[in-house]
């Protein structure tokens, strides 16, 4: 049995049984007759697990699908188990860039026997990472080539930061602040915007939940820098032009490793300059909820030992931040220097 999902520990993923048959008559009798014959190969994958989360849709499905299907040049069938139609529709521009066929909701093909010349069961390359030491990396399935595919899929004009779509150098770097409205809210977002403007940035603040994927991709691609608190919406960094700056604000609570795995490490493959800003206890709303001697503030790693649900509940779901503007100004200056 296999689970065709990239993270073996994910819940609610349908099991599939793989039977390998040889060339003798005994094995041949195990093979049912085909009801549909296909000339192109197929890839079997699951749309269950964590993919309702925007980051995991890219990390666990779209980018791995790209790396596995790259060599087929769209001449491949996608067999989606645990099919989620609205997610497939939401990202249809990317899916259609990877295959010329309609995605098959394979769980509903009861009584049908689809026959393919070759099938790949499962995906690889999670966490928006791929081994850059592989042969022919630059001309095969690479992160930069995936970004090129995204630019084509969404008609994004800018390949390089600090250039207009016509290749002219703008005088003012454009900064996008990714806004959050529920958890991990940046309470002084307006003041941060003012500081950035004083430093010479043109600033736009936007909540991706109010955009389509395509329209937000257009906005991100028009900017030279993007910043926001750790969360799935930061996955939109993948639409930034190369040489852009990406600044991740890490909530208090030793969240750095999670932040780097999700966004810091992939940034290098995207040719994006990565910066991070760590929230102190004074900047965190947790300082108003817990006493200074509470382990939540004094010893976050002791909370980590209690498991992911406790980490998420305290440090991610129930924390807002108020940035120290003087300290934050320094990292904005550093970001601007990287752009020039």
Image (spheres, rainbow, N blue to C red):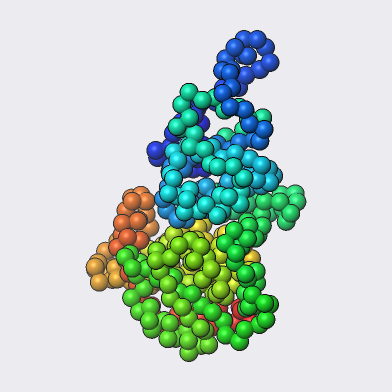
Q: Which x, y percent locates residue 198?
A: 48, 89
Image quadrant holding the C terminus, namely: bottom right
Q: Position of residue 57 (x, y in %)?
A: 48, 51
Can residue 59 be seen?
no
Q: Position of residue 317 (x, y in %)?
A: 32, 60
Count of residue discs:
0
Above or below, 13 against 194 in this view is above
In-image side of 226 versus 191 (left or right): right
Q: Nearer the viewer, residue 338 or 89?
A: 89
Q: Position of residue 64 (x, y in %)?
A: 57, 47
Between residues 286 and 178, which one lies in front from this camera angle? 178
Looking at the image, which residue is at 37% across and 68% down? Answer: 180
Q: In front: 121, or 93?
A: 93
Residue drawn at (64%, 35%), measured in percent from left and top?
41
Image quadrant assignment for residue 117: top right
34 up-or-down from 280: above or below: above
Q: Which of 222 and 273 lies nearest the eye of the viewer?
A: 222
Q: Residue at x 59, y 12 (%)?
A: 29
Q: From the viewer's perspective, is 315 left or right of 102? A: left
Can residue 30 be seen at all in this image of the molecule? yes
Residue furthest toward the bottom? Answer: 198
Q: Is residue 112 above or below residue 101?
A: above
Which residue is painted at 64% across and 75% down in the image?
Answer: 165
Please indicate whether residue 137 sits to the left or right of residue 51 in the image: right
From the viewer's perspective, tell me whether residue 100 is left or right of residue 248: right
């Amino acid at each position: 049995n296999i689970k065709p999902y990239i993270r073996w520990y994910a819940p609610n993923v349908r099991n599939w049984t793989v039977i390998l048959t040889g060339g003798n008559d005994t094995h041949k009798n195990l093979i049912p007759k085909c009801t549909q014959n296909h000339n192109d190969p197929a890839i079997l994958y699951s749309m269950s697990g964590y993919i309702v989360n925007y980051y995991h849709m890219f990390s666990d499905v779209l980018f791995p699908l790209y790396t596995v299907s790259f060599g087929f040049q769209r001449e491949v069938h996608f067999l989606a188990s645990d099919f989620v139609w609205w997610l497939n529709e939401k990202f249809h521009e990317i899916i259609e860039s990877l295959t010329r066929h309609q995605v098959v909701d394979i769980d509903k093909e009861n009584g049908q026997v689809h026959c393919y010349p070759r099938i790949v069961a499962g995906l690889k390359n999670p966490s928006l990472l791929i081994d850059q030491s592989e042969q022919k990396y630059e001309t095969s399935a690479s992160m930069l080539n995936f970004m090129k595919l995204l630019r084509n899929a969404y008609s994004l004009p800018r390949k390089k930061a600090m250039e207009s779509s016509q290749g002219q150098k703008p005088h003012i770097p454009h900064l996008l602040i990714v806004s959050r409205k529920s958890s991990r809210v940046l309470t002084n977002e307006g003041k941060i915007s003012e500081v950035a403007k004083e430093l010479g940035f043109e600033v736009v603040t936007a909540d991706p939940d109010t955009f389509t994927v395509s329209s937000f991709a257009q906005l991100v691609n028009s900017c030279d820098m993007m910043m926001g608190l750790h969360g799935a919406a930061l996955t939109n960094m993948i639409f930034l032009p190369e040489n852009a700056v990406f600044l991740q604000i890490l909530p208090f609570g030793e969240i750095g490793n999670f932040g780097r795995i999700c966004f810091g490490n992939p940034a290098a493959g995207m040719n994006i300059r990565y910066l991070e800003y760590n929230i102190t206890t004074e900047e965190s709303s947790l300082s108003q909820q817990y006493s200074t001697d509470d382990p939540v503030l004094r010893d976050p790693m002791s909370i980590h030992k209690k498991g992911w649900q406790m980490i998420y509940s305290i440090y991610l779901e129930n924390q807002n931040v108020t940035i120290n503007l003087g300290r934050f100004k320094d990292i904005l200056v550093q970001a601007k220097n990287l752009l020039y």
